[in-house]
Image (tube, rainbow, N blue to C red):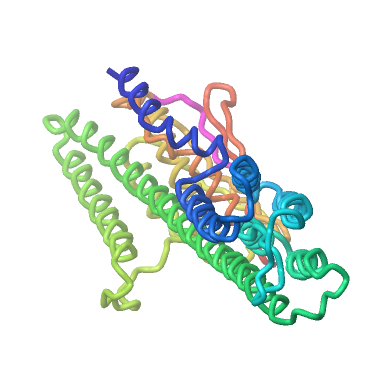
Amino acid sequence: MVQGHSLAKTTNHSPARANRAFGFTRADLAVVLVAFVIELSAFIPAASGSLSGAMAVTAVVYVASGFIALRWRHRAPILVFAVLLLHQSLFVLFFTPNYFNFSDFFHVPYMPVMAVLLALAAVASDRPLRHSLAACVTAIALPVLISSRGTPFEDLWFIGTGAAYMGGAWAFGRFVARNRLRISALEEERRKAEAAVAQERAHIAAELHDIVSHAVTVMMLHAAGGRRVIDTDPERAAQALDVIESVGTEATQELARLLRLLKPHGGTVDEEQQSPLPTLNDIHGLIEPVRSAGVQVDVRASGESGKLDPSVGHAAYRVVQESLTNISKHAGSGTNALIDLRWEPRTLTLNISDDGGGRPENRVDGTSGYGLLGLRERVEVAGGSIEWGPRNQGFFLSARLPSSP
């Protein structure tokens, strides 16, 4: 079924691909056809009675051949414009002198103009201003020089008409170019907005992972431990339930904060009611539930503590949270863990390790995919770096974050 559906899609879209390969969109084809009809409607009356049957057919074919070049007018606008100007000049030289009777009103021969107008508009829309102005002046001057036969300024009406036609085509092309630039700018703004939304979604997804993963892991450990001792040590089982309630309440509050962030801008949210983001000073709230689940967590600090920006402090908090979550989940009760804080003049290094000596109550095989990879992105956004890997029987994580003295 999938292959059949794919084949159907290919078949349905093949005409569009064929049009693009040929060089025409439907709009381009419609514009060229309308221009050709207008050209014929002007050419046939001018040629009637002046060209024989064979020569008239030849002239029509010659005029039509110029429109074929319009296929490439947006790929090579200046080249196509030059070819069509030459095409127009050759028409005057080969057909007009012998077969056209000039009217007393115009005093000029007929010459094909619609293809040149479209080519000039393409130059104006696709090339810089100086190129398009030069093309416009050439498109006005060359027909005047060819048709005037040495007296170019005797027919000012013809010069003015040519300037009006060519100037109009040039102005239309510049209008298209301006609109194209505006559309490109709007599309760029839309892409930036979409990127910002995607980045914010990734940030919120990482926050959700940190909150839910840590809370659920700790609650699972205490639920398993409480169930094991509920008959022999009801007091410890009650303590486990207290921890579950406390961790669940904290996770609920953080989730509520994230939900407030997701509300529309028009919502009435009191900023004073929004709890601040947790920082490195709040890690004891992470450590105590893990300790009560049977993981021995020691904290060691060295050096003179510096000041952390709020975003950096929050990143440090999430580093500790993710590390303790992984230790609780994969190493379990009986593990010895160490959180080593090393303060340097402009750097805080967080070294978190465990000896892998515990036994997890419930090993979880599946992961969400955020975890350490999401933590790397969080730390790098804060201006730091992070690395991790197995060490002896346990696991080691080291994060470097910028600080102020």
State the residue at coordinates (81%, 64%): 146
State the residue at coordinates (73%, 61%): 345
Q: Is residue 99 left or right of residue 47?
A: right
State the residue at coordinates (33%, 60%): 258
Q: How many marks?
A: 0
> Residue 362: in sight, yes or no?
yes
Residue 217 locus on image (x, y percent): 31, 38
State the residue at coordinates (23%, 55%): 249
Tell me the quarter of the picture where residue 96 sits. bottom right
Tell me the quarter of the picture where residue 256 sits. bottom left
Tell me the quarter of the picture where residue 255 sits. bottom left
Indicate whether 63 appears above or below 152. Answer: above
Q: Is residue 354 magenta?
A: yes
Residue 351 locus on image (x, y percent): 59, 42
- Quarter of the picture holding the N terminus: top left
Q: Which residues lie in the magenta part?
A: 351-358
Indicate whether 195 appears above or below 276. Answer: above
